[in-house]
Amino acid sequence: MDLGLILAGGIASGTVLLFAAIGEIFAERAGILNLGVEGMMLMGAVAGFSTTLTTGNPWIGLVAAMTVGGLLALLHAVVTIHLRADQVVSGLALTFLGTGLARVLGEGLANTNVARLPAFTVPVLSNIPIVGPIVFRDQSVLVYVGFVLVPLAWFWIEGTRPGLHLRAVGEAPAAADAQGIGVYRLRYAYVVLGGVLAGLAGATITLAVAPGWFGDQTVNGRGWIAIGLVIFARWNPIRAAIGGYLFATITPFNLGLQGVDRILGFENPFLPGRSATFFLDMLPYLFVIAVVILGSRQAARRRIGAPAALGIPYVRGERGR
Amino acid sequence: MTIRLEPRTSVPRWLSPALTIGAVAVALTISGAVIAAVGGDPVASYLHILNASFGSVGVLSDTLVKATPLILTGLACALAFRMRLWNIGAEGQFLLGAWGASAVVLFPLVPDGTPAIILIPVMMLAGMLAGGLWGFIPGVLRARLGVNEIIATLMLNYVALLWIQFWVFGAWSESGFQQTKAFPDAALLPRLADFADAVPAFAGLTVHLGLLFGLVTAGLLWLFLERSRWGYEIRLIGDSPRAARYAGIDIGRRLIIVFAISGAIAGLAGMSEVSGVVGRLQDRISPGYGFTAVIVAYLAKFRPGRVIVAAILFGALILAGREIQPSGVPAMIQGIILFTLIVADVLVRYRVRIERRVPVTAAAASPPAASPPAASPPAPSPGAGG
């Protein structure tokens, strides 16, 4: 068992969580909670996979996945922003819809193979001792996109004028509106951007990290894990990225663990056929709960956290918040 | 053209049911279009669903069997949702309930040969306790630590499935298969078919006592919500948490108790499924009852009586949908129905007004005095207003 391989795998599958979590951060910072991440990711995964199967070009598949994610998010945006429906229920509906639709569209895709997006090694950086081979060797192009996206997203939100507008819309929409910021327009834009990133996250699974279509199991709750990460990260893209990489490393860890007889000289209690594997498989989900507990406690203690207008429809002319 | 939503001052009585039915019709139309688009035959699919679920007494009985867990899990969700607690964990609570009931037989917690009259109530209690515990956990996390209950309940669903697998693949495995040994007869809920000797018409009917659990629970829940002080407080918390706080209601306590009761009802559904249908514990005892329950509760507008009707409809969809290709169709229809229901709900609360703006060219062509409001400057529209 090679620890480096496991960590490199963690970086790769962490990219999936990172895209989805940053997309959700954008939507939530604009004040719209979108619980449809799981559904959008599944639709992105199936759209990317089947488009690549038909066209033979994973880049077209990637575009298809992001488009589908954005369209589903647009549906959520219309229902929650203009129609003022409950964001929780609409998001849940989006997940149900995406899951069902993905299963219909994914019919017959199991056991097929498609071209992956290219992977490459970064020339100089991969020679850095220890870190280099893990982070920069033979990673998918999307992993590097993730590296670039994280600081960009953070800087966009915290350091630019449009980012200031985004935060204003999520914290105090009435005040933002009075300043001439188009609250509806920005909310639409960021909810759709969130969907595009969720679609990208789905395609990252099927076109890069774990190619193939396995029905609902393709995403297997990672959309929800991403939403948990957003709370843990206190709506900060950099914390979300760190959380995503850490979290994803646990999952390949147990895949790796299941193959070895001895860990650090002790007999491995988690070998297949021993019942403890089931408890090991529970760890990621329990970890999310633990992480959300921590995030909620910190948010409560420091009185920072969720955007103030998160989940509240904005109606021009009604008493603002 | 601008779309405006204006709150309705009064809602006609017929509007809400009419829109609900309309929403289901629209959803079926959209689903039909998708089925046709992927190469299926929507009309044949729907006729098949109708025929395979309501076509004869035999299949109607099977529909009711599928509806039974949906009634109970739907009631579990309806109770929590009424308080605006998003318990998406009925699936996990269902599984834990099934596990608790099975534990009574398989550990065993009662001596072999215990008569059904004792064994069945003990199994019910164990199932409700286990499911209730699985609801109690997210309840405490939400009330005491402020943890988002949607995430907690969803994660616990995955944990519950792995917990079941641990037992089914391990200690309780029947010679290595992914199921436990069959329960003794005393642990099985009576079915109508068991009385075929006395009433020949019951021969082959699979409806079991669990349906009665569902109907009784619905009645009790209605009494609880509509006729008790507790129910009133829960509805008040759901409608206006601020008012409830001012009224001195301990919201955290209510929240934990409602979550535990909700879990117990879902747990009873799990007990009824292993004891009335499967007759043993397997890891795949639920085709997603706990998730469909969310839509059942929403379609029923959280009213216990309507949950029964909605559960029967979705029971039919699950029963007949098994044979429909592609296999994801029932799940897709459920998702689309939930979406159209949300839109219908908006239409109940708001009146949609579409205001036409006279196009600039037309305004210029008409006499200037004819329509002063339309001649307003063609400035960029402020995001379609609201």
Image (spheres, coloured by chain):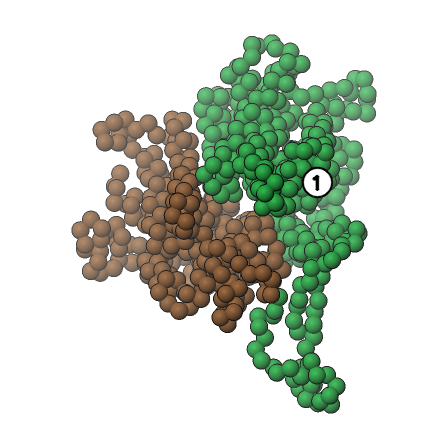
Chain colours: A brown, B green
Does residue B105 sit above or below B26 in this rendering?
above
The residue wearing badge 1 is: B303
Q: Nearer the viewer, residue A142 or A177?
A: A177
- Asked which secondary structure carries label 1, the reply is loop
- Residue depicted at 47% across the width and 34% down the height: B159
User: Could you tell me residue B200's position as x and y percent?
Assistant: 81, 22
Q: Chain of mark 1?
A: B
Question: What amino acid is found at the position of numbered circle 1 in the picture?
Answer: Arg
Where on the picture, by quarter, is residue B112? top right
- Residue depicted at 26% across the width and 31% down the height: A263
User: Could you tell me residue B105's position as x and y percent?
Assistant: 56, 17
Q: Nearer the viewer, residue A153 or B240?
A: B240
User: Could you tell me residue B162's position as x and y percent?
Assistant: 46, 32
User: Could you tell me residue B43's position as x and y percent?
Assistant: 73, 52
- Residue depicted at 51% across the width and 46% down the height: A215
Left or right: where A199 falls relative to B240:
left
Quadrant containing the N terminus of chain B is bottom right
Quadrant containing the C terminus of chain B is bottom right
